[in-house]
Amino acid sequence: IAGITQAPTSQILAAGRRMTLRCTQDMRHNAMYWYRQDLGLGLRLIHYSNTAGTTGKGEVPDGYSVSRANTDDFPLTLASAVPSQTSVYFCASSDRAGADTQYFGPGTRLTVL
Amino acid sequence: AQTVTQSQPEMSVQEAETVTLSCTYDTSESDYYLFWYKQPPSRQMILVIRQEAYKQQNATENRFSVNFQKAAKSFSLKISDSQLGDAAMYFCAYLRDAGNMLTFGGGTRLMVKP
């Protein structure tokens, strides 16, 4: 069982380009999340999905969009990347929203130049 | 809004000794969950331990235990018999009941000296 996989592992992107970060989980968890971690800081929630077909905004959603077409996949899209979006992005999942522990993927390091 | 504070940016411990990492939080909720996550240089976020606020008993996981003081809003992590592999960033995190967002502290970097 792989748990949560993220792709790519790292990426350098020119400002203004569109980028989709991929996240797949094989635990059949209902809830999924995207966080960003800036240098020396804890993680902040970007978007979440409590179940397939639903999404919600987290603490720092501007400039990002998500979709949840099925249980396993939760891609994060940057429509027009800006340098302030340089960060490490973590996908996470939990059996259900609210009470359950969130488990994290390995992260994607994104640099926007 | 909930906040989580880790007042120790860095800590060091001798191998085989015990170290305690501090965490305080602010909330008006009565039902919530608290976590410690470990982030080694590989950057993977690894769950160390979880505490439900409604449980009075402190959680333990092998060499890791917590001191949960609900009235004081304090949630410290004790690592016993420290090992070189324990060296990492440690993050305290809060999740309110029925919430989606983990609120993280700023982290404590733990160094383990051989």
Image (cartoon, rainbow, N blue to C red):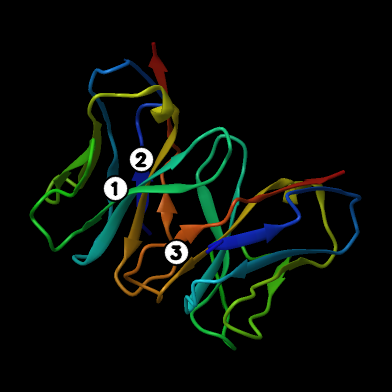
**Chain letter for mark 3:** B
At 89% from the left and 52% from the top, the residue drawn is A15
The location of residue B77, given as percent across then percent down, is: 25, 37
Dot 2 amino acid type: Thr
The location of residue A43, given as percent across then percent down, is: 52, 50
At 32% from the left and 16% from the top, the residue drawn is B15
Callout 1 environment at 10 Å: few (<14), some (14 to 19), or many (20+)? many
Marks 2 & 1 on one chain = yes
Q: In this view, does B48 lie to the left or right of A32?
A: left
Q: Name the residue under label 2.
A: B5
Furthest residue in direction left, as rendered: B56
The span from disc 2 to disc 3 (Cα, nearest Å) is 16 Å
Could you say whether the residue bearing mark 1 is in a helix, strand or loop? strand
**Chain letter for mark 2:** B
Q: Name the residue under label 3.
A: B101
Dot 3 amino acid type: Met
The span from disc 2 to disc 1 (Cα, nearest Å) is 6 Å
Going from N to C along the chain, the mark reached first, 2 or 1, is 2
At 73% from the left and 50% from the top, the residue drawn is A9
Q: In this view, does A9 lie to the left or right of B53?
A: right
Q: Residue B25 carries which label?
A: 1
